[in-house]
Amino acid sequence: MTILNRKGITAGTLAGISMAMIAGIGAVAAKADSAKQSDASGGVSIRSIVVFPIANDAGSAADAVSPQIDDAVRLRLDSVNKFKVTRFSRLLPTVQRGLEDKDLTEQDVAAPFGDDDKDQPRAAKIAQRMDVDSYFVGNLDSYKADTTTKTVTLQVTGTLYFTQSGGSAKTVGASVTEKPQNASDDMSTVIQAAVNDAAGQIASGINGLQVTPPPVVIKSTEHRQSLNGGGLLIAIAAGALIYAATHHDNSSGSSSSTGTGTGGTGGPPAPPL
């Protein structure tokens, strides 16, 4: 075996150390890239929402109120410019293609969509085709309009679901009692105020979610710069070790091949008798 130094480190050992150091550089760089794409705030990954028409469970007197709540919720979510918000319609291109391809049925796309075991799976199926992060379904649970006192009371509940996992991202609700602000207010004004109040409570609950920003894509120039400092020093050291190993091995091999002696030790020749 060729000896490179007095401590007995071979060329193979040095080469192995060098390769391990180079592999370490790659691992450190990969870890740094991964860290840059993580969200330190621990927020959820929701950047787009489809809002489905809520189900009216309050009776025929509220038939005109539930669509008003749908519009008001969407407008308030849009106003903060935090999410890309889409209101469901069977006329959406992705929905139309699903119907044409027979992936969706007429029953699948029939509004409304309550937060229950019958409607929520239908909404999930459509949301997956639309490639959105989440979807909202809900119910107008109760509604009463007293024309004598001009008082409107209503209750709305709903859930924002993750599209891919189907898990609940946020459960929201609103309970409203609205009365005239001015003596001249008519019932339609009071009803609209109640709708706005309920929609505001629902939107505030959804807007309160901490949202993960889009992943940061590291440019090639930034990646090269990540090798500066300690990483660059390690790379230089690894190269020096490889250079020393190969050159020292060659020189040692040449000197050992010229020596003769007993037992193959490469020592000096025996003195003449």
Image (spheres, helix red, strand yellow):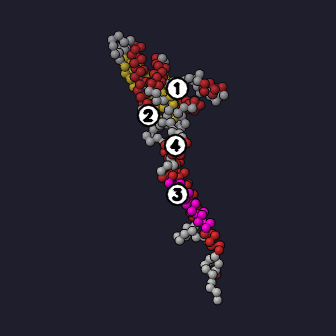
Q: Position of residue 177 (x, y in %)?
A: 37, 21
- Depth-wise, is mark 1 or mark 3 nearer the camera? 3
Q: Quadrant of residue 23?
A: bottom right
In this picture, which residue range is highlighted in magenta?
Answer: 233-251
* Secondary structure category for the residue under label 4: helix
Of circles 4 and 1, which is in front? 4
Tell me the amino acid under the disc marked 3.
Answer: Ala
Q: CA distance from mark 4 to mark 3?
A: 23 Å
| Circle 1 residues within 10 Å: few <14, some 14–19, many ≥20 | some
Which is nearer the N-term, disc 4 or disc 3?
A: 4
Give the amino acid type for the residue marked by disc 2 in the picture. Leu
* Residue named by callout 3: 237
Which label number is shown at residue 222? 4
Which residue in the structure is indicated by mark 1?
A: 86
Residue 134 at x, y percent in the picture? 51, 32
> Tag 1: residue type?
Thr
Q: Which residue ends up furthest to the bottom in the rendered image?
A: 273
